[in-house]
Amino acid sequence: MIKAKLPEYDYDIIIIGGGPAGYTAGIYAARAGLKTLLVEGAATVSQITITDLIENYPGIPEGINGFDLMQLFKNQALKFGLETMAADVTSIKKHNSNTVIWEISLGNKILRALSVIAATGAEWRKLGVPGEEEFAGKGVSYCATCDGPFYREKDVIVVGGGDTALQEALFLTHFAKKVIVVHRRDRLRAADILQKRAAAQKKIEFIWKATLAEVVGGDLVTGVKLTDVESGKTSEIPAEGVFIFVGRIPQTKLFEGVVKLDAVGYIITDDNMQTSAAGIFAAGDCRAKQFRQVITAAGDGANAIYGAELYIAALKGESY
Ligand code: NAP
Protein backbone atom coordinates (compact mmCIF):
# COMPACT_ATOMS: atom_id res chain seq x y z
CA MET A 1 0.00 0.00 0.00
CA ILE A 2 1.32 3.48 -0.85
CA LYS A 3 1.33 5.67 2.23
CA ALA A 4 0.59 9.35 1.68
CA LYS A 5 3.15 11.86 2.96
CA LEU A 6 1.43 14.28 5.27
CA PRO A 7 2.75 17.52 6.77
CA GLU A 8 3.72 17.33 10.46
CA TYR A 9 0.94 17.24 13.01
CA ASP A 10 0.49 16.58 16.75
CA TYR A 11 -2.71 14.53 16.87
CA ASP A 12 -4.90 12.50 14.56
CA ILE A 13 -7.92 13.97 16.31
CA ILE A 14 -8.54 16.86 18.67
CA ILE A 15 -11.90 16.73 20.43
CA ILE A 16 -13.17 20.06 21.77
CA GLY A 17 -15.61 19.67 24.66
CA GLY A 18 -15.83 17.48 27.75
CA GLY A 19 -19.48 16.44 27.88
CA PRO A 20 -21.12 13.15 26.90
CA ALA A 21 -20.46 13.72 23.17
CA GLY A 22 -16.81 14.63 23.68
CA TYR A 23 -15.97 11.80 26.07
CA THR A 24 -17.81 9.18 24.00
CA ALA A 25 -15.80 10.37 21.01
CA GLY A 26 -12.75 10.05 23.24
CA ILE A 27 -13.58 6.45 24.20
CA TYR A 28 -14.05 5.42 20.55
CA ALA A 29 -10.99 7.29 19.27
CA ALA A 30 -8.60 6.07 21.96
CA ARG A 31 -9.86 2.51 21.66
CA ALA A 32 -9.36 2.68 17.87
CA GLY A 33 -5.71 3.56 18.47
CA LEU A 34 -5.98 7.08 17.06
CA LYS A 35 -3.69 9.66 18.67
CA THR A 36 -6.31 11.82 20.29
CA LEU A 37 -6.47 14.82 22.63
CA LEU A 38 -9.66 16.02 24.32
CA VAL A 39 -9.61 19.67 25.32
CA GLU A 40 -12.21 20.76 27.82
CA GLY A 41 -12.89 24.33 28.88
CA ALA A 42 -10.71 25.46 31.77
CA ALA A 43 -13.58 27.37 33.36
CA THR A 44 -16.70 25.85 31.80
CA VAL A 45 -18.55 22.72 32.87
CA SER A 46 -20.71 20.40 30.83
CA GLN A 47 -24.42 20.98 31.46
CA ILE A 48 -24.85 17.33 32.39
CA THR A 49 -22.65 17.69 35.48
CA ILE A 50 -25.24 19.97 37.07
CA THR A 51 -28.18 17.68 36.28
CA ASP A 52 -29.57 16.12 39.42
CA LEU A 53 -31.05 12.91 38.08
CA ILE A 54 -30.84 11.09 34.75
CA GLU A 55 -33.23 8.19 34.72
CA ASN A 56 -33.57 7.51 30.99
CA TYR A 57 -29.98 6.51 30.27
CA PRO A 58 -30.22 2.85 29.25
CA GLY A 59 -28.64 0.30 31.54
CA ILE A 60 -29.01 2.39 34.70
CA PRO A 61 -32.62 1.74 35.75
CA GLU A 62 -32.16 3.27 39.20
CA GLY A 63 -31.08 6.60 37.65
CA ILE A 64 -27.82 8.45 38.17
CA ASN A 65 -26.62 11.93 39.02
CA GLY A 66 -25.19 13.77 35.97
CA PHE A 67 -21.81 14.38 37.60
CA ASP A 68 -21.43 10.68 38.45
CA LEU A 69 -22.43 9.57 34.94
CA MET A 70 -19.85 11.94 33.43
CA GLN A 71 -17.20 10.53 35.76
CA LEU A 72 -17.94 7.03 34.41
CA PHE A 73 -17.56 8.30 30.81
CA LYS A 74 -14.23 9.95 31.71
CA ASN A 75 -12.80 6.93 33.51
CA GLN A 76 -13.67 4.70 30.56
CA ALA A 77 -11.96 7.08 28.11
CA LEU A 78 -8.85 7.39 30.31
CA LYS A 79 -8.66 3.61 30.61
CA PHE A 80 -8.19 3.44 26.83
CA GLY A 81 -5.46 6.08 26.94
CA LEU A 82 -7.25 9.27 25.93
CA GLU A 83 -5.12 12.37 26.54
CA THR A 84 -7.00 15.30 28.06
CA MET A 85 -6.20 18.94 28.70
CA ALA A 86 -8.07 21.69 30.55
CA ALA A 87 -7.73 24.77 28.36
CA ASP A 88 -9.85 27.18 26.35
CA VAL A 89 -9.55 26.87 22.58
CA THR A 90 -9.27 30.37 21.15
CA SER A 91 -9.37 29.65 17.41
CA ILE A 92 -9.52 26.95 14.75
CA LYS A 93 -8.13 27.45 11.31
CA LYS A 94 -6.41 25.71 8.44
CA HIS A 95 -2.61 25.79 8.68
CA ASN A 96 -2.70 27.26 5.19
CA SER A 97 -5.17 26.93 2.35
CA ASN A 98 -3.30 24.06 0.66
CA THR A 99 -3.12 21.78 3.65
CA VAL A 100 -5.29 19.25 5.41
CA ILE A 101 -3.92 20.27 8.79
CA TRP A 102 -6.18 22.06 11.27
CA GLU A 103 -4.54 24.41 13.76
CA ILE A 104 -6.13 24.65 17.18
CA SER A 105 -4.96 27.66 19.20
CA LEU A 106 -5.00 27.55 22.98
CA GLY A 107 -3.84 31.09 23.69
CA ASN A 108 -0.18 31.11 22.59
CA LYS A 109 0.02 27.36 22.12
CA ILE A 110 -0.88 25.85 18.73
CA LEU A 111 -1.69 22.19 18.20
CA ARG A 112 -2.07 20.57 14.78
CA ALA A 113 -4.50 17.81 13.95
CA LEU A 114 -5.88 15.97 10.94
CA SER A 115 -9.41 16.03 12.28
CA VAL A 116 -11.42 18.03 14.82
CA ILE A 117 -14.54 16.99 16.70
CA ALA A 118 -16.74 19.90 17.81
CA ALA A 119 -18.49 18.81 21.00
CA THR A 120 -18.83 22.21 22.63
CA GLY A 121 -22.45 21.83 23.76
CA ALA A 122 -24.85 24.59 24.64
CA GLU A 123 -25.36 26.87 27.63
CA TRP A 124 -28.43 28.02 29.48
CA ARG A 125 -30.36 30.80 27.80
CA LYS A 126 -30.89 33.98 29.79
CA LEU A 127 -34.05 36.07 29.66
CA GLY A 128 -32.33 39.47 29.74
CA VAL A 129 -34.94 41.01 32.07
CA PRO A 130 -34.13 43.71 34.65
CA GLY A 131 -32.67 42.23 37.82
CA GLU A 132 -31.65 38.90 36.22
CA GLU A 133 -27.98 39.76 35.93
CA GLU A 134 -27.91 41.96 39.05
CA PHE A 135 -29.23 39.15 41.26
CA ALA A 136 -27.32 36.26 39.64
CA GLY A 137 -25.91 34.31 42.57
CA LYS A 138 -28.05 36.37 44.97
CA GLY A 139 -31.29 34.54 44.33
CA VAL A 140 -31.23 34.07 40.55
CA SER A 141 -29.90 30.67 39.50
CA TYR A 142 -29.63 28.39 36.46
CA CYS A 143 -28.76 25.29 38.49
CA ALA A 144 -31.11 23.69 41.01
CA THR A 145 -28.58 20.99 41.92
CA CYS A 146 -26.03 23.65 42.84
CA ASP A 147 -28.28 26.14 44.60
CA GLY A 148 -31.41 24.23 45.67
CA PRO A 149 -30.16 23.53 49.22
CA PHE A 150 -29.97 27.31 49.89
CA TYR A 151 -33.76 27.51 49.65
CA ARG A 152 -34.89 25.27 52.51
CA GLU A 153 -38.42 26.21 53.57
CA LYS A 154 -38.41 29.17 51.17
CA ASP A 155 -40.61 30.03 48.20
CA VAL A 156 -38.98 29.81 44.78
CA ILE A 157 -40.00 30.59 41.22
CA VAL A 158 -39.13 28.36 38.27
CA VAL A 159 -39.45 29.95 34.83
CA GLY A 160 -40.04 27.65 31.81
CA GLY A 161 -42.25 24.79 30.71
CA GLY A 162 -39.80 22.27 29.24
CA ASP A 163 -38.27 19.05 30.63
CA THR A 164 -35.55 20.97 32.45
CA ALA A 165 -37.97 23.34 34.18
CA LEU A 166 -40.19 20.53 35.48
CA GLN A 167 -37.38 18.20 36.41
CA GLU A 168 -35.60 20.93 38.35
CA ALA A 169 -38.90 22.11 39.91
CA LEU A 170 -39.41 18.56 41.20
CA PHE A 171 -35.87 18.53 42.59
CA LEU A 172 -36.43 21.86 44.32
CA THR A 173 -39.39 20.41 46.25
CA HIS A 174 -36.80 18.52 48.36
CA PHE A 175 -35.87 21.87 49.89
CA ALA A 176 -38.34 24.64 49.15
CA LYS A 177 -41.63 25.29 50.92
CA LYS A 178 -43.31 26.14 47.63
CA VAL A 179 -42.20 25.98 43.99
CA ILE A 180 -44.13 28.20 41.59
CA VAL A 181 -43.65 27.31 37.92
CA VAL A 182 -44.26 30.29 35.65
CA HIS A 183 -44.91 29.38 32.02
CA ARG A 184 -45.71 31.66 29.11
CA ARG A 185 -48.39 29.35 27.65
CA ASP A 186 -51.19 27.20 29.07
CA ARG A 187 -49.54 24.01 27.84
CA LEU A 188 -46.24 22.52 28.94
CA ARG A 189 -43.56 21.39 26.54
CA ALA A 190 -42.20 18.84 29.06
CA ALA A 191 -42.61 15.07 28.68
CA ASP A 192 -45.87 13.61 29.95
CA ILE A 193 -44.24 11.67 32.79
CA LEU A 194 -42.73 14.86 34.23
CA GLN A 195 -46.03 16.74 33.82
CA LYS A 196 -47.83 14.04 35.79
CA ARG A 197 -45.23 14.03 38.55
CA ALA A 198 -45.34 17.82 38.84
CA ALA A 199 -49.14 17.86 38.92
CA ALA A 200 -49.10 15.29 41.73
CA GLN A 201 -46.51 17.18 43.80
CA LYS A 202 -48.35 19.34 46.34
CA LYS A 203 -45.49 21.83 46.72
CA ILE A 204 -45.64 22.78 43.02
CA GLU A 205 -48.04 25.47 41.80
CA PHE A 206 -48.37 26.81 38.26
CA ILE A 207 -48.89 30.31 36.99
CA TRP A 208 -49.92 30.02 33.35
CA LYS A 209 -49.63 32.51 30.49
CA ALA A 210 -47.21 34.74 32.32
CA THR A 211 -43.68 35.94 31.69
CA LEU A 212 -40.96 37.17 34.01
CA ALA A 213 -40.80 40.96 33.71
CA GLU A 214 -38.32 41.74 36.49
CA VAL A 215 -36.49 40.26 39.44
CA VAL A 216 -36.74 42.54 42.47
CA GLY A 217 -34.97 42.73 45.81
CA GLY A 218 -32.44 44.53 47.99
CA ASP A 219 -29.21 42.71 48.78
CA LEU A 220 -30.96 39.47 47.84
CA VAL A 221 -34.02 38.60 45.77
CA THR A 222 -37.35 39.29 47.45
CA GLY A 223 -39.75 38.66 44.56
CA VAL A 224 -40.57 38.83 40.88
CA LYS A 225 -42.77 40.94 38.67
CA LEU A 226 -44.78 38.86 36.24
CA THR A 227 -46.65 40.04 33.16
CA ASP A 228 -49.91 38.37 32.25
CA VAL A 229 -49.57 37.49 28.56
CA GLU A 230 -53.22 38.17 27.76
CA SER A 231 -54.03 41.29 29.78
CA GLY A 232 -50.52 42.75 29.76
CA LYS A 233 -50.96 43.52 33.47
CA THR A 234 -47.97 43.18 35.79
CA SER A 235 -48.16 41.82 39.33
CA GLU A 236 -45.53 41.22 41.98
CA ILE A 237 -45.19 38.01 43.94
CA PRO A 238 -42.77 37.32 46.78
CA ALA A 239 -40.05 34.67 46.38
CA GLU A 240 -36.50 34.21 47.60
CA GLY A 241 -35.19 32.22 44.66
CA VAL A 242 -35.69 32.46 40.88
CA PHE A 243 -34.58 29.49 38.78
CA ILE A 244 -34.56 30.14 35.02
CA PHE A 245 -34.78 27.18 32.61
CA VAL A 246 -35.83 28.57 29.24
CA GLY A 247 -33.73 26.49 26.86
CA ARG A 248 -30.21 26.65 25.58
CA ILE A 249 -27.94 28.47 23.17
CA PRO A 250 -25.23 26.63 21.22
CA GLN A 251 -21.59 27.21 22.14
CA THR A 252 -20.34 27.51 18.59
CA LYS A 253 -18.65 30.93 18.33
CA LEU A 254 -15.34 29.20 17.68
CA PHE A 255 -16.75 27.62 14.54
CA GLU A 256 -18.25 30.77 12.99
CA GLY A 257 -16.76 31.15 9.51
CA VAL A 258 -15.13 27.70 9.80
CA VAL A 259 -18.19 25.46 9.27
CA LYS A 260 -21.79 26.15 8.26
CA LEU A 261 -24.13 27.03 11.14
CA ASP A 262 -27.93 27.19 11.07
CA ALA A 263 -29.93 30.36 11.74
CA VAL A 264 -29.62 30.02 15.53
CA GLY A 265 -25.98 28.98 15.52
CA TYR A 266 -26.09 25.17 15.71
CA ILE A 267 -23.49 23.34 13.56
CA ILE A 268 -25.00 21.71 10.48
CA THR A 269 -23.87 18.14 9.84
CA ASP A 270 -24.89 15.20 7.70
CA ASP A 271 -26.01 11.88 9.22
CA ASN A 272 -22.37 10.92 9.76
CA MET A 273 -21.63 14.10 11.77
CA GLN A 274 -19.58 15.56 8.90
CA THR A 275 -19.73 19.37 8.85
CA SER A 276 -19.27 21.59 5.79
CA ALA A 277 -15.47 21.55 6.35
CA ALA A 278 -13.50 18.39 5.50
CA GLY A 279 -12.03 16.90 8.65
CA ILE A 280 -14.34 18.69 11.09
CA PHE A 281 -17.14 16.64 12.65
CA ALA A 282 -19.70 17.82 15.22
CA ALA A 283 -21.43 15.88 17.98
CA GLY A 284 -23.92 16.52 20.77
CA ASP A 285 -25.86 19.62 21.78
CA CYS A 286 -23.84 21.99 19.56
CA ARG A 287 -25.15 20.20 16.46
CA ALA A 288 -28.37 21.06 14.61
CA LYS A 289 -30.76 18.21 15.42
CA GLN A 290 -34.14 17.48 16.92
CA PHE A 291 -33.47 15.68 20.18
CA ARG A 292 -30.82 16.69 22.70
CA GLN A 293 -30.23 13.99 25.28
CA VAL A 294 -27.19 12.32 26.87
CA ILE A 295 -27.85 9.21 24.81
CA THR A 296 -28.11 11.12 21.51
CA ALA A 297 -24.96 13.10 22.34
CA ALA A 298 -23.11 9.86 23.07
CA GLY A 299 -24.38 8.35 19.80
CA ASP A 300 -23.19 11.43 17.91
CA GLY A 301 -19.75 11.12 19.51
CA ALA A 302 -19.37 7.52 18.35
CA ASN A 303 -20.55 8.37 14.81
CA ALA A 304 -18.25 11.38 14.59
CA ILE A 305 -15.21 9.24 15.42
CA TYR A 306 -16.13 6.63 12.86
CA GLY A 307 -16.40 9.40 10.25
CA ALA A 308 -13.08 10.87 11.37
CA GLU A 309 -11.44 7.43 11.33
CA LEU A 310 -12.45 6.85 7.69
CA TYR A 311 -11.38 10.38 6.75
CA ILE A 312 -7.96 9.98 8.39
CA ALA A 313 -7.42 6.54 6.87
CA ALA A 314 -8.07 8.04 3.42
CA LEU A 315 -5.63 10.90 4.13
CA LYS A 316 -2.93 8.50 5.26
CA GLY A 317 -3.53 6.18 2.30
CA GLU A 318 -4.61 3.44 4.70
CA SER A 319 -8.24 2.99 3.62
CA TYR A 320 -9.34 -0.60 3.69
P1 NAP B 1 -36.77 23.53 25.91
O1 NAP B 1 -37.32 22.16 25.68
O2 NAP B 1 -36.31 24.35 24.75
O3 NAP B 1 -37.87 24.33 26.74
C1 NAP B 1 -37.67 25.69 27.04
C2 NAP B 1 -38.89 26.19 27.78
O4 NAP B 1 -38.66 27.56 28.09
C3 NAP B 1 -40.17 26.10 26.95
O5 NAP B 1 -41.25 25.73 27.76
C4 NAP B 1 -40.31 27.53 26.43
O6 NAP B 1 -41.66 27.91 26.27
C5 NAP B 1 -39.70 28.34 27.55
N1 NAP B 1 -39.14 29.60 27.05
C6 NAP B 1 -38.22 29.76 26.06
N2 NAP B 1 -37.94 31.07 25.91
C7 NAP B 1 -38.70 31.74 26.80
C8 NAP B 1 -38.85 33.09 27.10
N3 NAP B 1 -38.15 34.05 26.48
N4 NAP B 1 -39.72 33.43 28.10
C9 NAP B 1 -40.43 32.48 28.75
N5 NAP B 1 -40.34 31.16 28.49
C10 NAP B 1 -39.46 30.79 27.52
O7 NAP B 1 -35.48 23.50 26.90
P2 NAP B 1 -35.12 22.49 28.08
O8 NAP B 1 -36.29 22.23 28.95
O9 NAP B 1 -33.87 23.01 28.69
O10 NAP B 1 -34.79 21.13 27.32
C11 NAP B 1 -33.78 21.14 26.31
C12 NAP B 1 -33.61 19.73 25.76
O11 NAP B 1 -33.09 18.87 26.78
C13 NAP B 1 -34.92 19.11 25.30
O12 NAP B 1 -34.69 18.34 24.15
C14 NAP B 1 -35.33 18.24 26.45
O13 NAP B 1 -36.12 17.16 26.08
C15 NAP B 1 -33.96 17.78 26.97
N6 NAP B 1 -34.06 17.42 28.40
C16 NAP B 1 -34.48 16.15 28.69
C17 NAP B 1 -34.62 15.75 30.01
C18 NAP B 1 -35.07 14.36 30.32
O14 NAP B 1 -35.32 13.61 29.41
N7 NAP B 1 -35.24 13.98 31.53
C19 NAP B 1 -34.33 16.65 31.05
C20 NAP B 1 -33.93 17.94 30.72
C21 NAP B 1 -33.81 18.31 29.38
P3 NAP B 1 -42.58 27.28 25.08
O15 NAP B 1 -42.92 25.90 25.54
O16 NAP B 1 -43.72 28.23 25.04
O17 NAP B 1 -41.73 27.33 23.85
Image: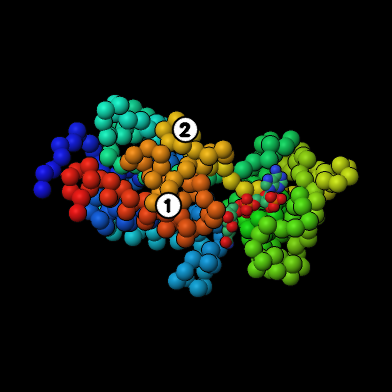
Q: Earlier in the sequence, mark 1 or mark 2?
A: 2
Q: Secondary structure at mark 1?
A: loop
Residue ID at (10%, 48%) = 1
Q: Which quarter of the image is occupied by the C terminus?
A: bottom left
> Which residue reaches farthest left?
1
The residue that label 1 is drawn on is: 271
Amino acid, disc 1: Asp
Residue 194 position in % (x across, y down): 66, 65
Compared across the picture, whether 254 is left or right of 308 comes to: right
Residue ID at (77%, 52%) = 185
Compared across the picture, whether 149 is left or right of 82 comes to: right
Compare residues 141 and 253 and report the one nearer the observer. Answer: 253
Vertical arrangement, residue 34 with respect to residue 265, above or below: below
Q: Which picture quadrant has residue 224?
A: top right
Indicate the colouring scheme: rainbow
Vertical arrangement, residue 236 with respect to residue 71, above or below: above
Residue ID at (33%, 60%) = 76
Is residue 154 among the parts visible in the rendering?
Answer: no
Q: Which picture quadrant has residue 88?
A: top left
The image's mark for residue 256 is 2
> Label 1 vs label 2: CA separation?
21 Å
Is residue 314 among the parts visible in the rendering?
Answer: yes
Residue 124 position in % (x across, y down): 59, 45
User: Callout 1: 10 Å neighbours few (<14), some, many (20+)?
Assistant: few
Residue 38 position in % (x across, y down): 34, 46
Amino acid, disc 2: Glu
Compare residues 149 and 3 and report the one nearer the observer. Answer: 3
